[in-house]
Amino acid sequence: MSRRPYFAPNRYRKSRGDSYIPSRGTHLPSPERLPVERNHHTDRSYDRDRYFSQRDRGDAKYASYSSKFNPREQTSMSRTTSSSSTSVKSTSSSATIHDSASLSTATSKNAVLQSPPLSKWESDTNFDITKWKDQKHLLHNGQLTDPNAICMADRPAIHAVYDPEVKKDESKGKTIVYKSYPKDSVPKTKDPRQRHHQSTPKRHKKIPYKSLPIPKFLYDKNSVGPEPPSEIVISGLGNLWNETYLRNQVSSFGRIEEYDNIMDLSTGMLLGIVRVKFGGSIDKASRCAQKATDGLNNMTFEGKKIQAVLQRDSQTLETVKKKEITKRLVKQKKLEMKTAPAPTAPKAQLDAIARRDAKRELIKKQVAEQKAPHVKQSQQDTKEAFVIPNEISKYVKGRPFLFIDRKSTYDKISKDDLKDYLNRYDWTRILEEPMGFFVVYNSPNEARRCLRAENGQRLRTIKLDINLLLPEDYTIEESKEEERPADPVEEATLNLTKEFEVALLKDIRTKIIAPAVLKCLNIDNYPNLKEKIEPVIPTLPLQSKTMLKEESEEAKSYVSEVADDVFSLQRVFPKLPSFKKKTDHPFKKLTKAKRTRKLDTLPLSYKLNFEDDEDTESGTSRPETPQLEEDGQPKRKKPKTKEPILYSSSEEEEEEEEGEGESAKDSVPTTPEATQASVKPNEPVEELKDIEMADVDTSATETDEDYSKVDPLHRPTVTDIPIPVYDEPLLDHLNLEAIKNVIKDDEDLNLLRSVLASVEETPIKGSVKYWAWKQRQIEISNTTLKLEQLPESLRNKTGAQRSEGYFKIQDEIKAEYLPHRKRVHDPLATIQHENEENESSKVQSSRVNRANNRRFAYEVSNFNTENEILKLNQLNKRKKPVSFARSAIHNWGLYALEPIAAKEMIIEYVGERIRQQVAEVRERAYLKSGIGSSYLFRVDTDTVIDATKKGGIARFINHCCVPSCTAKIIKVDGQKRIVIYALRDIGANEELTYDYKFERDENDNERVRCLCGAPGCKGYLN
Amino acid sequence: MSSVTISKDLCTSFKVSKVFSHTETPPITSLDYDDSGQFLISTSVDECIQLYDITKGKHVKPVYSKKYGCHLAKFTHNQKNCIYASTKGDDNTIRYLSLSDNSYIRYFRGHKGFVNSLEVSPKSDVFVSASLDHTTKLWDLRASNPQASIPSTARSSVAFDPSGEVVALSNVNEGVVKFLNVKMFDAEPFYVLQLPKGYQWDKVEFSNDSKFIMLSSSQYGHLLYDSFEFLEKGKLDGFTPIPQNEFASNGCASFTPDGKYVFSGNGLGNVCVWSLNPLDNNRQPVRGNFKPLAYLKGDARPRLCLWNPCFAQFTTADVSISMWIPEEAN
């Protein structure tokens, strides 16, 4: 071994100035230690040739002081360079060939260590390991045998002075620049290290850590050794325990996979041992088990201290089991050994009388012993006085306490156990004495409660024998407290009876008293009062009388109804007959009286439904209904700007007018047909009213003639000059239709006849009716022709549109002549208002509806908070039926399918919620892709709703300068939403519009024309 | 994760916890940990780079390099990037591979022979490679051309010191270890350490506390030198040579991160532990041989041995990878 060559002849070494290290002698290979497998040799023969040829090529001289070369061009460069040293080199290389050959043919006897046998993979696979084998060879004899290696030992040491890849500098070019030190002036270096160098804050691989964390490997198929334990054994549970409670305790550490109660196989008794296996992956289960043992061991469970151990193997359980069995056996034996059983006193339940007896006896006895503080013992059978040890008495301080004899506990209970056990009671102190335990209470009741519940109970298999001891001072207090029923059942009944009482009172009030009172108030029951009113009535016209009666009836029915709204009562009043009054008209008095009576009765019914039950049987309720009181005063103080016909305007008159107006509204049906029927065309309503008034007035003054049956239109007036019943129409030209409109009755006809008497009669051929119809048709065609007369600019020169070729007519020009564009936007009276009351109830009902929906949604959300599907969209519920169709304004529009009342919600504007920036990008993209219509709706400065690609039909709503709807931004569940509300009443099939409220565009060319056609159209959208 | 102090007790309590033995696994030729100690990378003769997660003790994935072969895979400072040397054909390129997306970042071309030693600087993005083409080159990870190249006889091996400022370039043939300043790589070495005649070694290593240089050999045992004074500290006794295979060994011994203990695979099929701490050895570490502290049983073929830089864990490998952790963790 001593002759082993640890180095190879350094054939290619080139001296490098000072760093030259002399070779340790050229080694001549001895035949014994030049081994190489035969196959290797043969395999390599070709490669070797190549290797040497390469070597020769690469044998270039780099003598330059500072050379610049690119390694990639190296071969080409080497070819071009030649030097005198080449011949010298080649001779040495030829020697190497010989060396190498002789080396490779030799075999080694003393190979350092025997190689392991060929592994299976090597024979099976065909990985290219030739290089490796060469390396091994090298290892053995220190020879370079990489067949492909090009020796570059003769290259000078170089370093890069400029590398564009590291630091780019345009001025220095794109190729790397190397430099080498001149042979004779290679610089010397110093040890750059510092002895005690500070470790940098940067984390690196070679920090000398003194302590290291241990990685926690997950257990899997690669792990060595047994599985980590995932089972634990809990013992010391006693004979009986709450399994669910224990399970819950254990499952707080992890999912339980198996749960076993271990039984004593010989007796079948539960041993108080539980085996728990945790679920999940092995790692998780073992971690849970570890945690559980740490958490459960020595824990007090149901008053018993339990032990928990990891079950590493089945032995653990067996040992625990054996331990428990022997323990029990010992215990049993002990019990048998005891001749006298433990003094378990009969579980004396507290008996107040017995205690008092005992107390009295104790008092007698305690007279003798005055020194030590005495207490009475509640226990029935223990009649002797209990003497508190002196050291304890200062803690007890005359308070009641429970005493647990130490003998009965067998010294197995500690103070802490007891503390834990009694922690639900409000004790102040637990003292441990050689005699036993003292549990001191502040309140005797609490002490008693504890005694009642715990006496005779088991604390860790030990029966507690508790005695209550009360000091003298507590007797009175105690007896007082004694009388208070502590029974929850009794308390509950008390509460219930109270509630029942209240309910009963309410029932009596509403079901017995109220009808009785109402009955009392019935006018038929008061003949005297009736008579008082009666004498006035005959002066009234018949009509009024009946109306009055009806009214009183109505009022009564009203009273009986449950009036939930005070305001609704008001609406009865407008039904009063509209009379023209004179200041001291007797009827006025009557109406006033009537009113007061009503005022008396109405609030009562209202009040009956309230809890507040003061004296309801009086007229004092007036102040409580200020609204009603107000009613007696004139409603409107603002004088109407109307030309009085007969009277100078006065307050009263106006009041009456108001009333009259209302009555007209009430009595006349508001259906369009009905309105037309009752009010003749060409006659303004106002005038009609005036006439009416006049008529009524006369009917009131001229009592001798009854005009009430005459049509109000034709009733006589009080003026000297007769007023025309109908307005005189302005006839620009005379035609049949106009004449027809003018002639209202026979009188007019006669007048017309007399007028036309002078005109010569032109004979009409054929049927007169046909002639009349024809005349009418001619007239109609004349007017329509006029409509279709196009403006000058639109008339085509050639006379025919067809000859003009195709051209587009601008929308704004179209708007000027297409009739549907010219349509007048008048609000349609499609919503039926029977009367005000009706309308209010309608509004209310929608409100109630909404409230109901909200309640429902709340209940649903309470019922299941997790289910997203059940989440109700409040807005969807309130949605009105709408549909989209082609619009006169622009492409598509949204139409109401049924009448919508003002202020109602119509639809939500649904779409993608996007940011402002996104909206800008999208808007541009949409414009580019040809979507001219904008469906972007700004919610706030940062949010825009885009309904272009995804959205509801609300996007079809067009702009109108006089819109029917408005968009409001409301918050629903904290999110801003756009909701369209009706601004006014909207008829069925009417198009819905709202004001887009676009910002004004400065550039006039960019402005978008508005085609809404509304009378107040601004002409532009923006 | 709680830390444990590296002590005699801890070092003797190591047990194999995981064994990764892919069926018919060919020999593993190199091991390396990343800077955080979380990942382990191994190259094997079947042209496959295996990645392991140490924190969980899991095999993450194989990365195949069938075209070029692989050897000496070393992590760079970017956690999931590595450089490795090729083994096939004429190609001696060092490749910079991203393990996360299995793509090459850069090729480092320049060597004309098999690269037999490769080390990444612990602090900066430079690395040194030694090749059988009789050169040792210094590279920058950003550039594909070498930053410096010096002639060195074949079978050189390189090592960085913990500060990353010094490279120990050892040459078995010359029997010397040259200490070079990284900043002046092609200048004269500031020290040349002559080693005893006849001693051949596979690997040079600095201890993390910069106290020792260890020359480890699977055949001749391990020698310790003072890294500043360059004095021989002694030989690690009780080592049995490991039977050789076809592949050059590159490190069967490794320092613990604190530099107080040396773990090495042993020819008898166990892991040998030496303590360099005088307290454990009851002797002054002047000069003399170190007696082994313990032989750890568990891996029968610990050809390669490498300590984790950040965890109390080390790995041994031959045809399978064995991960060792202290017993108390189990």
Image (tube, coloured by chain):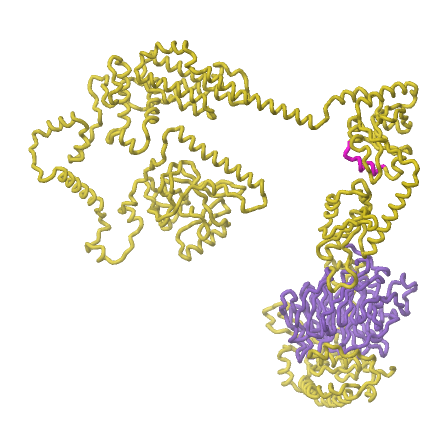
Chain colours: A yellow, B purple
On screen, A627 above or below A978?
above
Image coordinates of residue A879 in percent, x first then y, are: 44, 42
Q: Is residue B226 magenta?
A: no
**Residue A297, placed above or below residue A445:** below
The percent position of residue B12, horizontal first and vertical second, equals 85, 62
Q: Which residues are magenta?
A: A415-425
Please report the residue visible at 79 percent of the width from the left and 88 percent of the height from the top: A106
Decide if residue A440 is on the left or right side of residue A984.
right
Considering the image in quadrants, where does the N terminus of chain B appear? bottom right
Q: Could you tell me residue B243's position as x and y percent?
A: 81, 76
Q: Residue at the location (80% across, 79% down)?
A: A115
Quarter of the rendering containing residue B112:
bottom right
Depth check, front residue: B9 or A576: A576
In front of the other: A244 or A942? A244
Res A192 visible: no
> Is A404 placed left or right of A756 in the picture?
right
Q: Is residue A603 visible?
A: yes
